[in-house]
Amino acid sequence: MIIRKALSEDSPQIAPMLLLAMEDIVYKFIGKKDLDIAKDFLLHFVEKENNQYSYQNCFVAEEENKIIGAVNIYDGATLEKLRIPVIEYVRANFNPDFHPEDETQSGEFYIDALGIDPQHQGKGIGSKILQFLIEKYVNQKKQTLGLLVDEDNPNAKKLYVKLGFALVGKKTLVGKTLEHLQIKI
């Protein structure tokens, strides 16, 4: 397995994997629980540049020329700029009163979403992607990594803590309270 920077042509494979991690949030964005619309919504942004979900902000795990995992990560200081296209699109197409809370901030590289192909889950791929990010951002670049985890997902939190992430607070995103974890040197 290799982990590499995503390319534009990876977008159709990246979007459904990120959606696995973001499904409830995307449903809140689009105002309905419709998997097809949610997939189209996310693909719309993954294949475009200069937005928070862009392939430009993704890494993929690839095995035998097939993408089996994807992660979306960006500098928290850029959230406001990267989110503008998303907010404008949601307001124009789904909810004119859309005002999402800030899920990250300056001072951390934010792991927005991490998804593994369902056929490859349970094989440690998510852990390997996280270890790759920790090595790249924390150990090499001396940056802080942050993420949010649903309180209803203790297995994910257990993995993050095992890898060195620590609880630093709570955040609210589209009305849902999430735990904010970080890892730093």
Image: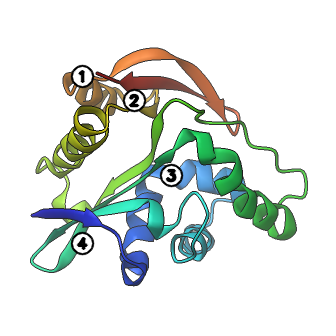
Q: Which residue type does callout 2 highlight?
A: Thr
Classed neighbour count for the residue bearing mark 2: other residues with Cα under 10 Å, few (<14), some (14–19), many (≥20): some
Q: Which residue is mark 2?
A: 144
**CB-based contact (under 8 Å), mark 3 and mark 1:** no
Dot label at residue 67: 4
Q: Which residue is mark 3?
A: 22
User: Which residue occupies 44% across, 29% down?
Assistant: 152
Q: Is residue 164 left or right of residue 6?
A: left
Q: Is residue 38 left or right of residue 8?
A: right
Q: CA distance from mark 2 to mark 1?
A: 12 Å
Q: Secondary structure at mark 1?
A: loop
Q: Is residue 43 above or below residue 130?
A: below
Mark 2 or 1, which is nearer the eye? 2
Q: Which residue type does callout 3 highlight?
A: Met
> Could you tell me if residue 22 is visible in this image?
yes
User: Which residue occupies 33% across, 23% down?
Assistant: 184
Q: CA distance from mark 2 to mark 3?
A: 22 Å
Classed neighbour count for the residue bearing mark 1: other residues with Cα under 10 Å, few (<14), some (14–19), many (≥20): few
Q: Which residue type does callout 4 highlight?
A: Ile
Q: CA distance from mark 1 to mark 4?
A: 26 Å
Which residue of the protein is positioned furthest toward the right in this rendering?
Answer: 96
Please state the horizontal and vertical placement of residue 59, each as a whole percent of the image: 32, 61
Please state the horizontal and vertical placement of residue 43, each as a whole percent of the image: 53, 74
Q: Secondary structure at mark 4?
A: strand
User: Which residue occupies 84% across, 58% down?
Assistant: 95
**Viewer-closest of 106 and 45:** 106
The disc, 1 or 4, on the residue closer to the chain's N-terminal end is 4
Q: CA distance from mark 3 to mark 1?
A: 23 Å
Mark 4 or 3, which is nearer the eye? 4
Q: Which residue is mark 1?
A: 164
